[in-house]
């Protein structure tokens, strides 16, 4: 049963990719609920359907069957224009690679979003939340990978989205830098109440989540709730 605080709900969700004669069943029979404000980790081996699920939740892809809802918006059956509005108003994305504009400074990269958002936070506030105030006038090439990822997070949250969807945000980073980035995501979740869904291959990261959704072969194999969350700085792998 969905409750008032359910932000995502999926029922019987399936996705089949067809390329010529070849069919790949990336997801099938996925049922899940995510409550507003939760920190969710999507865990599973390569090819288990994690990115497909995240992309459907974020309105970047559409399922082949089943239903998916964001609060009281039904995403299944929404037009391309409706999905674009949904993404613009409600969703912040963070990917493995940062996709920053090289010729713009940190502030300018974040301002690209705040200039067009309806109720953005001030650019400097977003930069402060990710701990990059001293670097705000630098260009991406002058920053480390972890710092560039933190700019990408500032850009994603500056429009005050209800959800932050992160696909392998630490995939290109070393251990210590990855932890710093996870700490920033945990801080956004805690301080702004933004629902966070983070994909990882790394089972150790699951300890920082409220809820861990284990995917395997395109299905939800297990949903686990952590009674005690571990801070990213205490995780080790
Ligand atoms: N556009 C596509 N066309 C055809 N098959 C696809 C497409 N996107 C994904 N797939 C297939 O769907 C399955 C699930 O892919 P998905 O990227 O969701 O897995 P994943 O768990 O995120 O994997 P990884 O951890 O390697 O990123 C895989 O078998 C993949 O090859």
Image (tube, grey):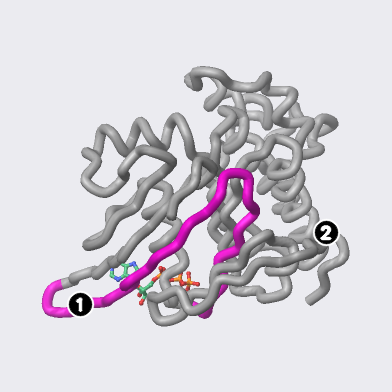
The secondary structure type at the circle numbered 2 is: loop
The quarter of the picture where the N terminus appears is: bottom left
Where's residue 159, x and y in %?
56, 28
The one of 119 and 209 positioned closer to us in this rendering: 209
Is 95 drawn above or below residue 105 in the view shown?
below
Q: Are marks 2 and 1 in contact (CB under 8 Å)?
A: no
Highlighted magenta segment, given as a residue range:
20-46
Q: Residue at x 65, y 22 (%)?
A: 121
Can you tell which mark lies on residue 152? none
Q: Is 54 colored magenta in this rendering?
A: no
Q: Earlier in the sequence, mark 2 or mark 1?
A: 1
- Identify the image quadrant of residue 28: bottom left
Kindly report the secondary structure that dominates the magenta region of the rendered protein. strand
Image quadrant occupied by the C terminus: bottom right
x, y (%) of residue 74? 31, 43
Give the residue number, with chain letter if any, for mark 2: 231
**Mark 1 secondary-structure assignment:** strand
Q: Residue 148: give x, y in percent of width and height.
A: 68, 45
Q: Residue at x 59, y 30 (%)?
A: 160
Ligand 1 located in image quadrant: bottom left
Is residue 34 one of those drawn in magenta? yes
Does residue 52 lie above or below 56 as drawn?
below
Front residue of 114/28: it is 28
Where 131 sits versus 174, above or below? above
**Local crowd at mark 2 within 10 Å, few (<14), some, or many (≥20)?**
some
Q: Is residue 6 visible?
A: yes
Gap between marks 2 and 1, in whole Å?
A: 41 Å
- Work out whether residue 152 can be spotted: no
Find residue 17 and report its horizontal and vertical position in percent.
Answer: 24, 69
Q: Which residue is mark 1?
A: 23
């Amino acid at each position: 049963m969905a409750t008032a605080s359910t932000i995502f709900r999926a029922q019987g969700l399936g996705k089949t990719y067809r390329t010529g004669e070849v069919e790949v069943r990336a997801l099938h029979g996925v049922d899940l609920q995510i409550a507003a404000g939760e920190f969710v980790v999507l865990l599973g081996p390569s090819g288990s359907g994690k990115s497909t699920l995240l992309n459907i939740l974020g309105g970047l892809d559409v399922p082949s069957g089943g239903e998916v809802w964001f609060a009281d918006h039904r995403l299944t059956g929404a037009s391309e224009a409706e999905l674009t509005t949904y993404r613009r108003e409600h969703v912040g994305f963070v990917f493995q690679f940062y996709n920053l504009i090289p010729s713009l400074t940190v502030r300018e990269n974040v301002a690209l979003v705040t200039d067009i958002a309806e109720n953005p936070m001030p650019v400097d506030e977003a930069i402060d939340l990710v701990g990059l105030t001293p670097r705000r006038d630098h260009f991406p090439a002058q920053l480390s990978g972890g710092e560039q990822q933190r700019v990408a997070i500032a850009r994603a949250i500056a429009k005050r989205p209800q959800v932050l969807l992160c696909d392998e945000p630490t995939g290109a980073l070393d251990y210590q830098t990855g932890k710093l980035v996870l700490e920033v995501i945990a801080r956004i979740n805690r301080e702004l109440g933004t629902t966070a869904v983070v994909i990882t291959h790394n089972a150790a990261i699951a300890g920082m989540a409220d809820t861990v959704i284990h995917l395997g072969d395109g299905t939800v194999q297990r949903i686990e709730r952590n009674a005690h969350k571990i801070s990213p700085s205490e995780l080790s792998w």
